[in-house]
Amino acid sequence: MKDFTWLLKMAWRDSRRSRSRLFLFISSIILGVAALVAIQTFSDNLQQDIDEQARTIIGADLVLNSNRQFPPDIVAIMDSIGGEQSSQVSFASMVFFPKSQGTRLVEVRAIKGNFPYYGEIDTDPSQASRQFQDSKQALVDRTLLLQFSSNTGDSIRVGDLGFGISGSVLDAPSQTGITATVAPPVYIPLQYLESTGLIKKGSRIRYSRFIKFDDPSQVGAVMEAVRPRLEKEDIDIDTVQSTKEDLGETFGNLTKFLSFVAFAALLLGCIGVASSVHIYVKEKLDTVAVLRCIGAKGPQALWIYLCQIIAMGLLGSVIGAAGGSALQLLLPTVFSDFLPLDVSLSISWQAIFNGIVIGLTISILFALVPLIKVRRISPLRVLRSGYESADDRDPLLWSIYVCIFGFVLAFSYWQGIGDWGDAFVFTLALLAAFAILSLVAKLITWAIRKFFPTNWNFIWRQSLANLYRPQNQTLILIVSIGLGTALIATLYFVQQLLISQVSFSSRGDQPNMVLFDIQTEQTAAVSQLATAHDLPLIQEVPIVTMQLIEVNGHTKSDAVEDTTIAYPKWAFNREYRVTYRNHLIDSEELAEGTWDSTSMENRDTIFISMDQGFAENMKVSLGDELLFNVQGAPIKTVIGSFRKVEWNRVQTNFLVVFPKGILEEAPQFHVLMTKVNSPEKSADFQREVVSQFPNISIIDLNLILSTVNEILDKVAFVIRFMALFSILTGLIVLISSVIISKFQRIKESVLLRTLGAQKKQIMAINALEYFFLGSLASTVGLLLALASTWALAYFSFDSTFVPSLWPLLMVYVIITGVTMLIGLLNSKGVLSKPPLEVLRSEI
Amino acid sequence: MSSILDVHNLTKTYKNGSNTLTVLDEVSFTIEKGATFAIVGPSGSGKTTLLGLCAGLDRPTTGWVSLDGHELHKLNEDQRAALRNQTVGFIFQNFQLIPTLTALENVMVPMELNKTAGAKSKAMDLLAKVGLAERHHHYPTQLSGGEQQRVSLARAFSNHPKILFADEPTGNLDEETSEKVVNLIFDLNKEAGTTLVLVTHDLELAQRTQRVIRLKGGKIVADQLNVA
């Protein structure tokens, strides 16, 4: 105990003149811990709020959804459940604002009853949500009203019917900023739906029944009894409990991903800790040798410095945790567009505790790597300055490496990846990055020494030689700056990659307007209307919806009951939107089988063609038999070919294509694709279509593109917000690495000053040295980032990454410039004081 | 009188690639308790290497050293550190004070390592003896070379060492300061009854000890007793 007190006392004394520097080492973990604590606090609060608000999110105790009208026996079952019930029919449709003559695709929600039973449709004026069903009134999304310069009291036309706008919708159950952007909601009373004329055969409609139980605890028991019957009819069942689970899982994944980004910032900070402590230990070698000489044991010397690191690590983690708790106040605002609920703001002691433990553990582990050598410093250094023990192999060092590997592996599994294999690959990749950077640094020092340009002038030679001379910082700075650059640049490139994936444009002959829900009898008239507006008919496709009943004689219940049957359950649950034609289109190519087989001429068997990837997921092969239910009529088919489909082309692409001659008489709707050159023409044409064919919906791809961009901007904001932690941490690591390296160069600079070197000569030597370091580190970091982004693009996003030159140059210039700037600012103080004063004041 | 330091056939070689450099070549001698002893020789003769081996700071290639009855080659690094703490005092040419500690704390460290009670007042007494009581709160960089060496002297005597190793103690000092420091070394040594092993190339200083050995090329070339 007495020994420990002395260790603490020595640690305190020894730190006295270097506390600010010690804190600088640790400051690089503050942001990482802050980000982790903020995300975990947010996650804890979100989970708690989901538990508390799940009922208001779905607005009822039980919600039943179907893509088809509920059959009479199901209606009877639902009616028998009792309680209070509401019905809703929702679908995408065009609406028309007479005041501004504008049209827009919206989600029409025709409702009957007092839904929502929990929470409310938040409207302005507030009574509008309770009164609109009494007459021919509609509730319209607030943004939509603003967009079309309409107000409460104006009118809106939905299909054939005009409605008075009784209020604007501010918020509704399960609505997020994003969902409202894609298809803003318009509520109308269900009793008027029929009169709108929008319900036609083949239309994609969602039927919902909301039920509020007199005793909500009965939901489980009731569902137990009716679930098999409902599932047989492919009815989706949402309860408060299932909503909690689904939301918990969805947002659990989100917060795990964000924690992972925060962990990356923390790791980056730890590299800063390790590099700073490495240089700190170098300066302490003589002190340790003296201590060893006068009788201190190796472990005692180690503990003196470990105590300092623990104290600073604790301080850094506590500051980080406090900052993180404050920062979480911002997160609900950052994520507001993605959340269907209000997130409360409260401190999570669990998150704070975890943050401190993780911050402290990881800073100790990384600091131990350079610190461990303190145990083995030879006391002989007191007699022979610079003496280093010949045997540097320390088995304990390997134990620390194993601990770090284990910690990163466990954390990446627990926090973000959730799969041991992937977590292992991530950790190995990180290790490989370390190894590559270290190797590059060593190669560079070797190459400079080997091919030293002896004919260069003094300043260039001096600065270049600093890269390999004893006490050089090449390895440390290249690893820390390089890894920081790699992390930050990867985040940036991935963001660019995601954005470029969806930024399809309506260039060339690509269509930019899609008309759908066209009834068969309307196709000719719609085509004529388009031609009258000088619009090309780029594609006109019929679509038939159907269900899969059997695969090779096996039904869904067979697949559920018999685990040896490989066909997945989802294949039976989904709705198939199918077209029929006898030719391939631009976005398809034949992968297997014969396309001719899809022709029905002189054949009895119906050969269909399937998307190759989808068939692999469904585990079906050529020649397999599929039985479809085409809205009541069973149709037996055989898989005749597989197609490779380019899904990212602006086309109507299909998983399943039937041959001509089978589905012509089935209930169907048509899609027409055209290209409109100006917004005015687009508005004119849309107005005409909505006026003549109210049931037809129009997707303006330019509008979709701007919506997608808007969503991506929001996603990009979240990514940038999280990347900010990495960037700031990288900057702190850079600053601390450079500041600490000042002490390496200080004596040399002072000696050069003493020998008569001018201030600008020393500045030039320093500037060039940091230019070389920043330049090399950022180049290697960028190369790593390019490689990792390429790998992510290839393996995760199934896309091709084409780097653009400007961002690369920008990152290079910024990192190199900042390294030089910090290096120069740092040495300025040394150069403005007399040499002796500098030597006396700097220890 | 019994011996405190036995050096037997001590050899130290260094390998540099395929070359072997012999710095010390079968050096043997014995030093009695309480004696004053000087090792002299030109630069590169192996004086400092010999001192390092005698104090257990380094391991010989062959031969052995017995310090206060302890055969150093049988002890590990930490055991040798403990022995140094209890038995040995050091004075170095470049003082080797810990830069982050004050003068007082530098003197206290060996006593604190040894868990000696009243370390602070004892350290103050020692600083007073070397004339630096007023400067006890100053850091090494705030002291002159002579003052730093006096602090180092106070630290060397803080644990009542049985043997004091001094490596060129006046090498970094001017003549006047050197004289003061040397007088202090011999006075404190006499007062405490400590054995003194002095490494120097200052022959005048060496003459103040009872016995002088001369090294050249790693071998003892002369062993001379001085008459008081």
Image: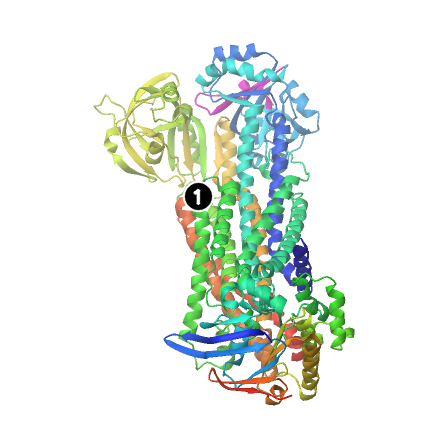
Q: Is A840 placed above or below A363 here?
A: below
**Chain ID, mark 1:** A
Q: Is residue A797 visible?
A: no
Q: Is residue A193 magenta?
A: yes
- Residue B39 location, quadrant: bottom right
Residue B189, picture quadrant: bottom right
Q: Residues within 10 Å of mark 1 (few under 14, many from 20)?
A: some
- Residue A355 in the figure: left or right of residue B142: left
Q: Residue B118's x, y, as percent?
A: 74, 63
Can residue A269 be seen from the camera position used here? yes
Residue farthest to the front, as pictured: B1
> Furthest residue to the left?
A602
**For residue A653, which quarter of the picture?**
top left
Magenta segment: A188-213
Which coloring applies here? rainbow
| Residue closest to the eye, A162 or A167 | A167
- Find the residue positioned furthest to the right: B134
Residue A152 image offset from top left, x and y in percent? 67, 30
Q: At 57% across and 85% down in the image, what residue appears?
A: B212
Type of the residue with mark 1: Asp
The quarter of the picture where the N terminus of chain B appears is bottom right
Image coordinates of residue A682 in percent, x first then y, are 50, 39
Instruction: Tell me the element at label 1.
Output: helix
What residue would you read off at disc 1? A422
Q: Is residue A345 above or below residue A520?
A: below
Front one among B193 and B42:
B193
Q: How many marks?
A: 1
